[in-house]
Image (cartoon, grey):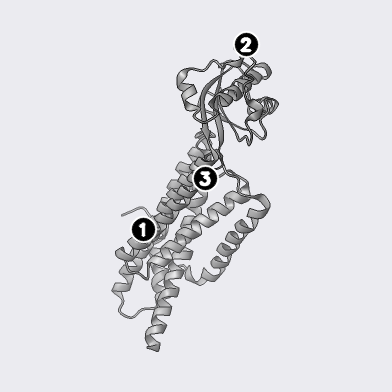
Amino acid sequence: MPFQIIKPDQNWDFLGKRRLCLGVSVGLILLGLLALPFKGMKMGIDFAGGTEIQLRFDPESLVGEGVIRRAATKAGIENPTVVRFGSEGNEFLLKFHIENLSAFEIDPTNTSDEAELDLDSELKNTMVSGSAETRINLVRKIEKVITEEVARVSVERVEFVGPKVGAELRRSGLLALGVACLFILAYIAFRFSARFAPGAVLALIHDVLITGGLWVILGFEFDLRVLAALLAIIGYSLNDTIIVYDRVRENMELRTTYDLVDVLNRSVNQTLSRTLLTSLTTLLALTCMLILGGSVIRPFALAMTLGVVVGTFSSVYVAAPVLLFLENRRNSSEKTA
């Protein structure tokens, strides 16, 4: 006997609440769209371009994000972002975007040893750009100021993403989402029928729009981790929707004459226990990642948490009502013909 948290004979009227839930979904999507002109979409370094430096302090140094941020600002960096990195607590990621690097160009008349940063060749090779020397000087200045203001620090890694690369990543990310939806549309049409496909794709678009809108409202940055979470959400939500659709198809085949609303309600109720168990176990793992995963993985875990909740909602209140709408239109067209 499989474990179930919902009684097998439970018959809640989910479709009866479809208009109310549609209003909630539309409201959340509009709220996210309205937040764009006021709060803007904060792009991370991956998409907007910028520099990321991994800093390591001595284990005995008591260092926090605030003092590093103030030191970086004193070095000439505007609006730097500092997050703790690693499990030991003495490593940090310093992220920032600089429009003009001319302020950090090396003075050719300066022949002192201070004009060179003591970086190994591998680290220097990571700073690929037309102005690599300027970037080395920038890192040297940051390292010097942080050492003077905070504590002795060593630069472990430097990564630079140019504006063109960031724009290309944005285009590639949007293309990945679009291609995923197109292939899902084709798969659902092949696996079930063309009438099932629009509901599944609309549910996925619904999940991405609401998760993205909530991300904008919360004021978090979009980066590759969030994009990866959105792609994972698409797969998770599709899995839920396919389970519901498969049960809908089975129930349709069992009844030659049927009330479609009743069939959809029964199908959702019959798969509800499995849907909730899957969502709860996924949320349990994501909660552990949020609490124990650290700052680096936290954006992915938070975006996934929002997406799992929204995806569970859409499998019931978006995919099924869209199928009902299309089936009613098809039946009306057949009666008219």
Q: Position of residue 104 (x, y in %)?
A: 64, 26
Q: Check disc 3 and give the amino acid type.
A: Ala
Residue receiving disc 3: 167
Q: Is residue 331 visible?
A: yes
Q: Residue at x 30, y 64 (%)?
A: 190
Separation of marks 3 and 2 at Cα, in angstroms: 39 Å
Please report the residue visible at 43 percent of the width from the left and 67 percent of the height from the top: 320
Q: Which label's residue is closer to the chain start, 3 or 2?
A: 2
* Residue identified by numbered label 1: 183
Q: Report, in whole angstroms, how far the alpha carbon at label 3 lies from the one at label 1.
A: 24 Å
Which of 95/59 is in front? 95
Please give the name of the residue rendered at 50% of the width and 47% of the height, measured from the top-left corner: 170
Give residue 188's quadrant in the image.
Answer: bottom left
Instruction: Work out whether mark 1 precedes mark 2 in sequence or the reverse, and give the earlier one.
Output: 2
* 105 lies left or right of 21: right
Residue under pointer 2? 112
Question: Dot 2, crowdedness within 10 Å: few (<14), some or many (≥20)?
Answer: few
Q: Residue furthest top?
A: 112
Residue farthest along the front direction in this orientation: 109
Q: Are marks 1 and 2 in contact (CB under 8 Å)?
A: no
